[in-house]
Amino acid sequence: MSKELTEFETDPYSLFIFAFKSPSTKEKSVPRLNKFFDYIGLNGTIKEKCSTFTDKAKDEPSLAMSSVIKYLQMNKYRVEKKEITAATLLNSVKVLKLFCEMNDILLPWKRITRGLPKARRYADDRAPTMKEIRMIVDYPDRRIKSIVSVMTSSGIRLGAWNYLKWKHIIPIEREGKVVAAKIIVYQGDPEQYFSFITPESFLELEKWMSYRKNCGEDITEDSWVMRNVWDRNKDGRRKSGTITRPRKLKSLGIKRIMETALWTQGIRKKLEPGMRRHEFQADHGLRKFFKTRCELAGMMPINIEILMGHSVGISDSYYRATEKELLDDYIKAIGFLTIGVENALRIEIDCAKNQQVIKDNEINSELYKKEQKILHYRQNHLTNSDAIAALSDKLMELMKEIEQLKKTQKRPL
């Protein structure tokens, strides 16, 4: 057995990290664990804290249990004061329980969690309105339109930006026109899936990548979709090396841009006394926006869940919509997901034209059916007329025969 493998297997932090499937869940869980270690007074790096707590917990399980209960009691008090929600507290419990399970720290979790408040199964925050979305994209950062339009039109999570490269955005054309673009989310990860973005969003990304290329960056299919900004001298010349050495803008950087935009644009204000949460979340609110608008557009709920990367239960094994079927359903929502006023109006006009074409086709179909029915009646009428004429001729012949028979009867024998 190699030295590296032995160190990995005996490292409590590595075992904890190994338990996560989703990168976004891992990013949220590590700070939660670190808060607990800070509360009980552990020092050092997160790895050192994990090792210290594990050693102490195995030597003195009662001390570990006492530390966990004190930490949860403190947070339970914060829930009662409405400083945090019960869901936040239970998320901390999940992290602590997972860490202990991965490191064979045996604690009576049923007893520990018995007195904790129950969490709501859903958050009471809302999705941002279209007006608020348009205010956000007016924030003076070249990247903001691309960021917001991608997230609102695809429903991706914030953590997806850590994986997103230019090759993961694939335009889809019909009759020589881009109708949408496919976006591959979490490429190479077991959680990989795909969604779509609107033509407007794809155009914003193209403009952003083109701007970077014109400034001197070597854009390839492996270029990160979002990168750090670079400076220019006052005379307009590029500072040496900054544009040519791009650094990926991670999810935390994108979150900061979003939050700065909310405050700068006057959308987010200081909370009133007693309130602990804003009306909508800076990043997850865009995901709620996507789902809400798709529902309003009339998309099939199961298709929305698939495009959001959600499990659909037993249907995961049986429901097999094709990419084309998902795209056709998604196209219904493009007008509802388009942010720009001009683009939205153009799409509304196109939709109205399409609706008129459909209506005209329906009318023409009804007219054709009526014409066919009239033709059928005429043919029946002509057939009936011919039958009546033939019957009349036959009747005349019979009458003549009857007259002949009468004359024959009157002749003397």
Image (cartoon, rainbow, N blue to C red):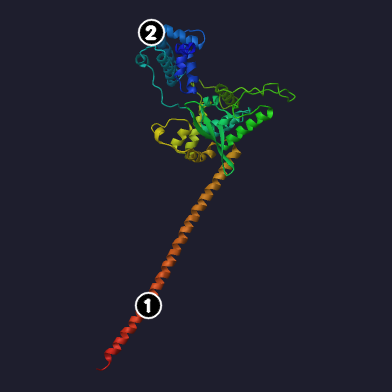
The residue labelled by disc 2 is 61
Amino acid beneath label 1? Ser
In the displayed structure, does residue 111 sit left or right of residue 209?
Answer: left
Residue 94, placed above or below residue 389: above
Residue 242: % across, % down: 67, 21
Q: Secondary structure at mark 1?
A: helix
41 or 322, nearer to the observer: 322
Q: Secondary structure at mark 2?
A: helix
Q: Residue at x 59, y 39 (%)?
A: 343
Residue 342: % across, % down: 61, 39
Residue 84: % across, % down: 46, 19
Q: Residues within 10 Å of mark 1 (few under 14, many from 20)?
A: few
392 or 5, nearer to the observer: 5
In the displayed structure, does residue 93 sit left or right of residue 136?
Answer: left
Residue furthest to the top: 59
The residue labelled by disc 1 is 392
Residue 233: % across, % down: 72, 22
Residue 405, placed above or below residue 24: below
- Tell me if I can see residue 128 in this picture: no
Q: Residue at x 51, y 50 (%)?
A: 358
Residue 365, placed above or below residue 217: below
Calculate the distance from the C-alpha at mark 1 to the C-alpha at mark 2: 114 Å
Using the image, tell me which numbered label, if any, was put on residue 317.
none
Q: Residues within 10 Å of mark 2 (few under 14, many from 20)?
A: some
Q: Residue at x 35, y 14 (%)?
A: 111
- Tell me if I can see residue 227 in this picture: yes
Q: Quadrant of the N terminus?
A: top left
